[in-house]
Image (spheres, rainbow, N blue to C red):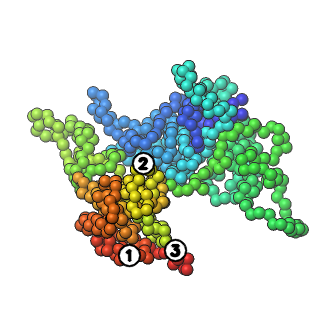
Amino acid sequence: MVLTTDPFTRALACAAISPGLRSILVFDAAPETLRLATQTTAQMLEVVTGHQVVPVTLGTFEAEDDLWGSWGLGSELELLQWKLGLLTGGQKKSPLRLVMIPDLTKLSLAAARACVVLMGADVAHLERHGQHEQWQPNLCWLAGCASDEVGMVSPHLLDRFALRLSGLVNKNTTREAEIRELLDERKLENETTPEPLSKEIYQILQTAVQQYPKITDEALARIFNYTASQVYWHRREITLARLSLAIARLDGAAEITVEHVNTAARIIGLRPIAQQIDELSKVPAPPVTPLPEPPKPDEVKPPPLYSLPDQSNVSASSEPIYESDTPQQLEPTIVYHPVNPYPEDKAPIEREAASLRLPIRRFRSKTSAYGSIIGVEKAKNLQDLALVRTLLEAAKFQAFRQQSTANAQRRLALRVTDFHSYRRAPVAEQMLTLVMDYTCLRECNWRQGLLPYLSWAYVERASICLIQVGVAKNIYDSRKYVAGKTKVSPEELRAERILARNILVPRIAAGIEAESGKATPLAHGLDLALQTLRHALQHGRSKVQQALLVVISDGRGNVPLEASRAGKIKLPVGSEGVKNALQIAERIRDLKGVKTVLLNPQPKEYTELPLELANALGAAMVAIPLFEAVEVE
């Protein structure tokens, strides 16, 4: 029987008969696997509910109007009609909706906030565009996510998914055979679809809905035995209990036994306490084993029902051993679950702070209208008007307004209350421009000095521009440009600029940790910073209201600006590179809305150059601690 040999399908059947488990998160599932799982779940839900299931897909572009509903043009008898949203399933007797999210990390902010509100909720309220609705959500959720990218998702959203499964299945075919199978034209013509449910599964699902088993004290103790060693959220214990109940209903049992709990834990990937402690213990054994102490007279041994066999020889990837009088009756193991069903507990944080909340706007421009449109709102002024929404609002009251006003030409009558403007996603209003001279960082603790400014950019969600000065290049052509006795490529004579939306972009972290090169085009780096700041602050209707310029340099620029632009250097250089850098720094000082900070690496030679550069920039100078000073402390 499929429901007894396939843990993945059995878990979907449990979710179909138990509304509390209808929020499923599948890790590391291929798109084809997730699609087939969605179709199989839809078939089971139709058997359980007796009604057709409406599929819904959420991606990266859904806005508030798409999710919750909006006014739209209706028929000739009714000019305007309220259109239900994608997530208002159950409202006004609409059928159950199966919501499929292909990639949870790319879900739009509006959709993520809606998922947190609706998942597991007993009642939903809608106060939008004059609508006052209250209904019981009738939704089933099925989402996919890569286990190594779970740190990008808000923990509040992950906590709403009750059932955790995995799309990884052991394969007996090679990669070459899979590619040949995909290239088979005969298989491309027929799209893969799940097999219809058999009569036996159909009867099992219908019978399971009518079953109401009771939980035993032993089963309840075993549930806590899986979650007692770590601080779990309460939803996880409730999920294990609900899954055990669903398995007992599928088996037609009158009571929930310990074996049902073990089966539920094996499906989602939970391990017994004994195995968890054994894996977490990393302390090596002492050379001499001490003699065990004799047991105390009043010591009470735990009942054998709660004890587990010795698993010291069981590897982390092997299947846990459960106690049973008839071990041969256990179902065959198919690897469908990850080692850890809750990888967010140990995953590195890659999301923004307060990722489900819009950032606080410190500056507000009255004329700019930037950012993607996420909805509409009542207009506070005549800027960025939503014309279609305004006309639809006015059209609702035309029959009344035409009767109450003398309007012979039957023109559209507008009122102040009709005007709506767009609601837009916030854009970065602050910017961090970082100019790093990699040739002066060897003897100072520059990471400690730079950390406060990177933290500021993270908290404020500022955009970032990294300008690399003196970074190593691995690209060389046949021509070699020689400065003294050092070979320098044309690429190293120029600075490089990296633009990113925020500090979390991986390219920024890799760029900050780059290696130093053989030349210092400081003048070209400051020139790139000048161009970037001008474009951000003065180009059209400005988006960036404040910029922070952080320069890490000892002021020793040995490449003139003309040499950087031409890609070749003429000897002797002299102090021309330093003079060019100071001239550009004075032009940066004249920019409005720019706060400049110079991090001084405290060079042993030419100690006056950082001070001259700070004066030219009009910057506050902060000394970077040297490694010797850090070691003494």
Q: Nearer the viewer, mark 1 or mark 3?
A: 1
Return the residue at label 2: 477
- Kind of residue at disc 1: Tyr
Q: Secondary structure at mark 1?
A: loop
Residue nearer the viewer, 473 or 434: 473
Residue 174 image-quadrant placement: top right
Return the residue at label 3: 627
Quadrant where the C terminus lies? bottom right
- Kind of residue at disc 2: Asp
Horizontal side of residue 505 vs 142, given as left or right: left
Residue 51 in the image: state x and y as whole percent. Answer: 53, 29
Query: Residue 606: which numbered mark, if any?
Result: 1
Residue nearer the viewer, 255 or 549: 549
Q: Nearer the viewer, mark 2 or mark 3?
A: 2
Q: Is residue 50 above or below residue 431?
A: above
Sequence-first disc among 1 and 3: 1
The residue at 28%/28% (across/down) is 77
CA distance separating discs 2 and 3:
37 Å
Residue nearer the viewer, 459 or 399: 459
Sequence-first disc among 2 and 3: 2
Query: Is the Cβ of the residue at disc 2 closer than 8 Å to that at disc 1?
Result: no
Residue 54 in the image: state x and y as whole percent. Answer: 49, 32
Would you call the spot at circle 3 few (<14 residues within 10 Å), some (14-19), or many (20 or more)? few
The residue at 24%/48% (across/down) is 384
The residue at 73%/60% (across/down) is 281
- Kind of residue at disc 3: Phe
Q: Secondary structure at mark 3?
A: helix
The residue at 54%/21% (across/down) is 185
